[in-house]
Image (cartoon, rainbow, N blue to C red):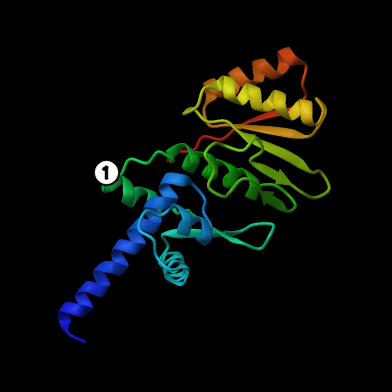
Amino acid sequence: MTNETTVKIKRQLLTLHYNVMNAIAKWGHLSVPSLHKLMPDKRPLNALYKATRELTAWGWLDCVVDKRKNKIFALTSRAVQELGIQGLETRGRSFLQMDIARTVWAFDQDGFFETLGLEAQPSIKMLDCVVKGPHPKALIVDHDLSHVSKTFQRIEDFTSAASPDAPLDIIALGEHRAAELQRFITQKGFRFQVHLIEVDV
């Protein structure tokens, strides 16, 4: 194999790794089949599996196993910083904020948690997480990049599908939003908990 061929192959691999991170930055958590559907340059599934394994080993991606035993990949903070240094603007930045807040919160809880809506979605799922165990809970994550009325609507949708007494926690990423959500819940007479988690991404 000539030096020129070797350089060309290495360049293609680096481009693939960059494109994988770019797609995850744009869409949030993704599985390999979702990457395969969403990436503009179509690559074989086995190449994407190899790239995600390598990026995880190098510390650029975190791997989460969902309730169906699928591997879902998310950017590490190191990868987010690297893409930021390169000046990449991602439409999915709000997904990154929400995913980090959800993961931080969920790992602090007792018992098993399963993530919902981790596949690429055109819009955010109503429930972001369900915590299982002796005291199961549902979780909605609010973030400053969407209007607070959307979170209000999600809470009301939840109560109509479940009940005002159902176990639900709401995560706010800023003090102002936490206070606003607490006022809304108090006015409605709901007994949900609002948690403030300040996440810097």
Depth order, front residue of 84/156:
156
Q: From this viewpoint, which residue is outermost toward the top?
A: 187
Q: In this image, 143 relative to 24: left or right?
A: right
| Quadrant (top left, top right, bottom left, bottom right) of the N terminus | bottom left
Which residue appears farthest toward the bottom when viewing the image?
A: 1
Q: What residue sits 80% from the left and 50% below the top?
A: 133
**Residue 172 in the image, given as x and y percentages of width and height:** 58, 30
Pick the residue in front: 113 or 118: 118
Give the amino acid at mark 1.
Gly
- Percent across and percent down for residue 115 are 65, 49
Q: Residue at x 20, y 74 (%)?
A: 7
Q: Is residue 161 left or right of residue 99?
A: right
The residue under the point 44% across, 40% down is: 92
User: Of 40 and 18, which appears nearest the observer?
Assistant: 40
Whether residue 51 sits left or right of residue 178 in the image: it is left
Q: Position of residue 15 (x, y in %)?
A: 29, 62
Q: Quadrant of residue 136?
A: top right
Q: Callout 1: few (<14), some (14-19), or many (20+) C-alpha neighbours within 10 Å?
A: few
Dividing the picture into quadrants, the one containing residue 193 is top right
Residue 201 to residue 38: above or below: above
For the point 78% across and 34% down, the residue is 167
Locate the C terminus and report the quarter of the image it occupies.
top left
Residue, disc 1: 87
Q: Secondary structure at mark 1?
A: loop
Is 155 placed left or right of 30 in the picture? Answer: right
